[in-house]
Amino acid sequence: MKIALIGYGKMGKAIEAIALEKGHQIVLKIDINNASDFNLENISKADVAIEFTGPHSAFENVMKCMELGIPVVCGSTGWLEKWELAKAYCDQQQGSLLYASNYSIGVNLFFEINKYVAQLMSSHTNYDVVMEEIHHTQKKDAPSGTAITLAEQVLTFIKQKKQWVNDATNNAEDLEIISKRIDPAPGTHTIKYTSSVDDIEIIHTAHNRVGFAGGAVLAAEFLHNKKGIYNMKDVLGL
């Protein structure tokens, strides 16, 4: 499979290493220094693009891939206020788009655990629930896209919580997400249920970027030769 990397930072390089190890070919690498190379002539050499940039550029990059007819796997977070526009354009173009807030297989299993625990806890209103996420200092958005996904899952079942907030709060209806930026942490997410008699915690800690990069390559392999809009649940059959 021929892959275009839109974003060639630490994640892009980690994706490249795994893709090459699996026998794929990197035919285009786009970063801030060669943005003009992101054009039809160059990207048409690719079977699929993998986009990892940031909230400032992700939407435009995704839209451009679909405009140029290239399936795109997007791992950038912090831009989902424009998600419905991207989905509508994908449908219009009969394109291919796969988005996940986190491509780690472990994190996607953790999402399923989080939903199950929240469902179990839903009737035990004597427990409060809070969240914490820790990332490296280069992480631009807060809370992380993974934390938002986890929070929205909790809110589905814990009805005494009405919305998440990215700060400490005394409002019992707010789901508190505390964001910390500490190097070199690649990502830790904690959901903690607390009562007067005990605590229950579930935690996912990434040790490096390999899990994220491997999942992104797996997603690209899944999206190749498909049309439509997908996520990691589709990739993993969850």
Image (cartoon, helix red, strand yellow):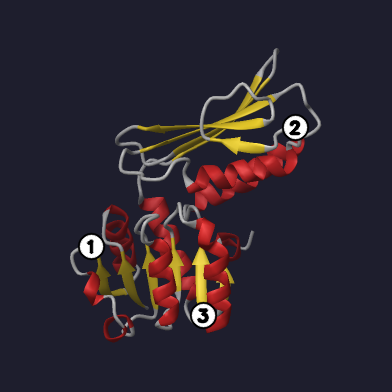
Q: Which residue is mark 2?
A: 160
Residue at the far right: name it. 123
Q: Residue 33 in the image: x percent, y percent? A: 18, 64
Q: Which residue is mark 1?
A: 32
Label 3: how many Cα within 10 Å (few below 14, some 14–19, many 20+): many
Q: Nearer the viewer, mark 1 or mark 3?
A: 1
| Sequence-first disc among 2 and 3 | 3
The residue at 24%/70% (across/down) is 35
Residue 110 in sight: no
The residue type indicated by label 1 comes to Ile
Tell me where residue 206 sits by quadrant.
top left
Spatial distance from mark 1 to mark 3, Cα to Cα?
Answer: 25 Å
Q: Is residue 69 left or right of residue 115?
A: left
Q: SS class of the residue under badge 1?
A: loop
| Sequence-first disc among 1 and 2 | 1
The residue closer to the viewer here, 151 or 191, is 151
Q: Which residue is mark 3?
A: 95
Rendered position, 8 above or below 139: below
Q: Residue 41 in the image: x percent, y percent? A: 28, 86
Spatial distance from mark 1 to mark 2, Cα to Cα?
Answer: 45 Å
Label 1–label 3 contact, CB within 8 A:
no
Q: SS class of the residue under badge 2?
A: loop
| Sequence-first disc among 1 and 3 | 1
Q: SS class of the residue under badge 3?
A: loop
Label 1–label 2 contact, CB within 8 A:
no
The residue at 55%/60% (across/down) is 232
Q: How many badges with numbers are in the image?
A: 3
Label 2–label 3 contact, CB within 8 A:
no
Q: Residue 36 in the image: x percent, y percent? A: 22, 74
The residue closer to the viewer here, 123 or 25, is 123
Classify the position of the N terminus by image quarter. Answer: bottom left
